[in-house]
Amino acid sequence: MLDVIFKIVIFGDAGCGKTTLTKRFKTNLFISDSQMTIGVDFETKIFEVDGKTVKLMIWDFGGEEKFRFMLSEYINGTMGGILMYDITDYPSLAHIDNWLSVINGKKERFPLVLLGGKADLDIIREIPFKKGKKFAKAKGFSGFTECSSKTGENVEKSFETLIRIMLNRA
């Protein structure tokens, strides 16, 4: 029996790892040859957090600018989100304000976690962990972490963090 159903969105620049994150969370497998998301993709997963059975409806948005206009319509009814950037690609963090402007025009406010992806590529990192954390705090994000879909590091934790925030607001 489900305790709650949450609709969440995952968005950010193309190539930052949104689809591999979603697939890793859903299947616990790293799928290295995932295709670029055209528009939006949808997954569900039933997950247990703090004794609550949660069904997540996960909306994974294509990161190309030509799909950005769709986000404002698809976020209706959203209870939380993950805004993702690539730790090896500084422009993906610099574009966060562009993504926030798309959703800030909506009346609905929902918690957002800032997530740095590709943490396994630390050797070619362009964005230090402390800079991402400071950025998240300055922009008013509800949480921050980094993860690796390849190794699985912090993948579940990223979703658990968001779920806990949403449960506390429910």
Image: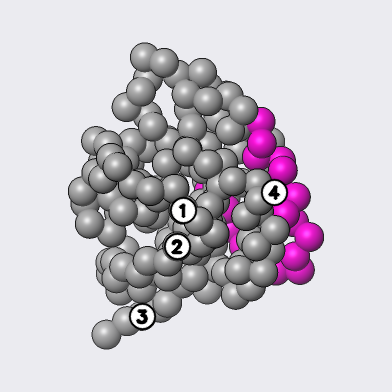
Magenta stretch containing residue 97, yes or no?
yes
Of badges 3 and 2, nearer the viewer stands: 2
* Residue lying furthest top: 123
SS assignment at label 1: loop
Q: Is the C-beta separation of discs 2 and 1 under 8 Å?
A: yes
Of badges 3 and 4, nearer the viewer stands: 4
Graded by Cα atoms within 10 Å as few (under 14), some (14 to 19) or many (20 or more), the crowding at tag 1 reads some
Q: Please name the residue shown 61% across and 68% down the image.
A: 74
Give the residue at mark 1.
37
Display coloring: one colour
Please give left or right for residue 7 compared with residue 140 in the image.
left
SS assignment at label 2: strand
Rendered location of residue 75, percent (x, y) = 61, 67
As drawn, the label of residue 100 is: 4
Q: Is the C-beta separation of discs 3 and 2 under 8 Å?
A: no
Graded by Cα atoms within 10 Å as few (under 14), some (14 to 19) or many (20 or more), the crowding at tag 2 reads some
Of badges 4 and 1, nearer the viewer stands: 1
- For marks 4 and 1, give the CA distance: 20 Å
What residue span does the magenta drawing correspond to?
Answer: 94-114
Q: Nearer the viewer, residue 131 or 30?
A: 30
Residue type marked 2: Asp
Q: Is 83 situated above or below 60? A: above
Magenta stretch containing residue 101, yes or no?
yes
Q: Is 58 situated above or below 18? A: below
Please give left or right for residue 83 compared with residue 105 in the image.
left
Give the residue at mark 2.
41
Q: Earlier in the sequence, mark 3 or mark 4?
A: 3
Give the residue at mark 3.
3
Q: Earlier in the sequence, mark 3 or mark 1?
A: 3
SS assignment at label 3: loop
